[in-house]
Image (cartoon, rainbow, N blue to C red):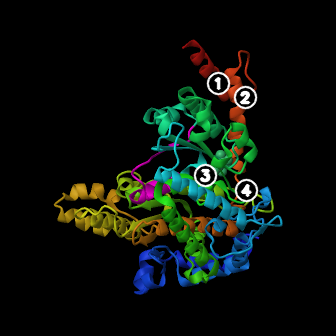
Amino acid sequence: MNFQETQSFNLLKKHKVFLDDFSIMDLFNQNPARFEEFSTSLGDIVFDYSKNKIDKKALDFLFKIANNLNLKEKIQDMFNGVKINTSENRAVLHTLLRDNISKNIMVDGVNVIEYIKLNYQKMINFADDVQKGIYKGIKGDRILDVVNIGIGGSYLGSKMVIEALKPYKTPLINFHFISNIDSTDLTEVLKKIEPETTLFIVSSKTFTTDETMTNALSAKEWLVNKLGEKAVSKHFCAVSTNKKEIAKFGINPDNVFEFGDYIGGRYSLWSPIGLPICIAIGKNNFQKLLDGASIADEHFKNCDFEHNIPVLMGLISVWNVNFMNVVAEAVLPYDNYLKFLPMYLQQLVMESNGKSVDRQGNFVQYQTSPIIFGDEGTNGQHSFYQLLHQGTENISCDFILPIFSHNEVGEHQLKLLANGIAQSEALMKGKSKEEAFDEMVSQGISQDNISKLLPYKEFKGDRPSNTFLIKQITPETLGMLVAFYEHKTFVEGVLWDINSFDQFGVELGKQLAKNIVKDLKSDEGISKHDSSTTGIITMVKALRNNK
Ligand code: F6P
C-alpha cells in the first residue's frame, strides 16, 4: 500500500486545497507560537520546519497516513534485521554498526552482532596503528599518505566526513581519493605521494566495480614498479564483503576488513568502509560519530511522530513533493567543512528513492525522489539561488546552520549565519510589487525606470524551507545529522511504497559501456547501435587511431 491508498489521503488532498488560500507568511501571522509549535530538537540540533506551508491538521493527516502504512512497525523491522530489501533478499542493518544496546540480531539464523564487533575491533586497531605510526611500510617508514580507491558509497561517505571533521584530523597523514575511471584522477594523486609512505585502501563492497578495480590494478602496478611485488602486502589493504575477489588481488588477510551484505553501499560509512575516516580522526572520534548516529537511531525508533525529526523530515518532504509540486530539494550547509554534504546526500537520497516501480512491481502514479542538489552557504547565493527565489519551479531548501565555527574570526561567523537566516526569510516572505515600488522610490529611481523594472523586482516568496540549527559540527552532531537524512529517506520510501535499498537503475549504463569498450578496441566493425551512438563511436575510434 502507498500513501495515496490510505484513508487519510483524500482528506489531506482536500485540506491542501484549503491551505492553497494561504501563504506561509499568513500561517505565521495567524499563529504567534508557530516557531515553537513547528520546531523540535534533539541534543545540539534544532529542526525548524515552520517555514513550510503546513499546519497541524495537515501534519495530523500525514501522521495518520504513516500509521496506516505501519511506519512504526516498518522501522522496527529494519532495526530487527527483517529482509526489507526484498528484491535482493537482504536485511538492512547499517544501524547495527552503531548499536551498543542490542544483543541479538539474527540474519539467516546467525547472530550478526559478534561478526560486526569483531570487524569493528580489527578496523579500529589497524587504524590506530596507522595513525600512530606503529604500522610501517615495507622499508620501515611511517604512513604519511592514505589513498582510498573506491566509488559511490565506497568513497562519498569517507570524503564527506573527513572534510566535515577536518578540525579533528591528524596533521600527520594526508588523505587522497581515487574514484573516477578517468586516469587523471589516479595520475594527479600518484604525483603527490611516495610509495614507501603510502597506504592504499581498496574499498569496494562487491570488489568487482570496474572503476575501482581498474584504478586498484593501476595503483598496484605503480607500487610494484617502484618497490617490487612484496610491497603489496604492506601497502595495500581492502574493505569488502567479497573475500574471494580480495584473495585474487593478493592482499594480505591481516589487512582485509569485512562487512556483511546487509550494509548498503550508500549507508556504509559506519562500517569498515569508514576506515579512512577512522585513521583520519582517530578511534575515539570515530566512536563519537557512531554514537551520534546511534542517538538519532534511538530517537527514530522510539520517539512519537510529532517530535521525531527524521519522521517529520520525511513526511514534510512527501507533503512538498506530492502536494506542493516541489521537484527538487536544495541542501545548503553554511559551513565550509560541509561542502561535500550535498554530493553525499545526492547518492543517499537519489540512489535510494529515484525509483518508479513500487514494491508490488507496479509503476507508481506519483512523483518519488526530488532532485537533490546544493552547495555551501554563500557561494550558492551567488549562483543558483536566483532560481530558488524567482525561478518557475518550486524548490524546497534545507538550511544547515552551525552556530559556532571551528575558525571564529572577527564577524565572519555572524555574517555567515545572518546570510543563511536571511535566505530562508527571503524565500518565504518574498517582496511584493508595492514594497519593490517603495524601495525604488526611496532609491531615487525615475518613474519611467520604476515601471520598467517593477516586474523583475518582485519576489513571489512562499517558498518552503527547513532549518537545522546545530551548535557546532562535531563527530556527534555530524553522526546525528547524517543518520537523520538516512532515516528521512527510509520514511519517504515507506510512503511511496518503494524499496529504498536496491539500485538496479545504475546497471544498464555499466553493461552498455562494456560493449562499447569492445567496440572501441576492435579492429573490425562495431556492434549494432542507433545512428548517434554509432556515429560517436566511429568518430572516437577514427580520431584516437589517427593521433
Ligand atoms: O553503481 C552503484 C553502486 O553499486 C553503489 O550503490 C555503490 O555504492 C557503488 O556502486 C560502489 O560499489 P562497490 O562498493 O561494490 O564498489
Residue 374 appearing in the image: no
The x, y position of residue 480, in whole percent, is 52, 69
Residue farthest along the right direction in this orientation: 109
Residue corresponding to mark 2: 529
Mark whose residue sits in front, 1 or 3: 3
Give the CA separation, mark 1 to mark 3. 30 Å
Give the CA separation, mark 4 to mark 1. 37 Å
The type of residue carrying mark 2 is His
Image disc number at residue 537 = 1
Circles 1 and 3 in contact, beta carbons < 8 Å: no
Image disc number at residue 153 = 3
SS at mark 3 in the image: helix
The x, y position of residue 16, in whole percent, is 58, 76
Give the CA separation, mark 2 to mark 3. 32 Å
Q: Nearer the viewer, residue 421 or 411?
A: 411
Mark whose residue sits in front, 4 or 1: 4
Label 2 beta carbon within 8 A of ligand 1: no
Examine the image and state in which quarter residue 68 appears: bottom right
Residue corresponding to mark 4: 261
Say whether residue 302 is left or right of residue 409.
right
Say whether residue 535 is left or right of residue 410.
right
164 inside magenta stretch = yes
Residue farthest along the front direction in this orientation: 140
Residue in the picture at 66% in, 80% down: 11
The type of residue carrying mark 1 is Ile
Circles 2 and 1 in contact, beta carbons < 8 Å: yes
Extent of the magenta region: 158-180
The type of residue carrying mark 3 is Gly
Label 3 beta carbon within 8 A of ligand 1: yes
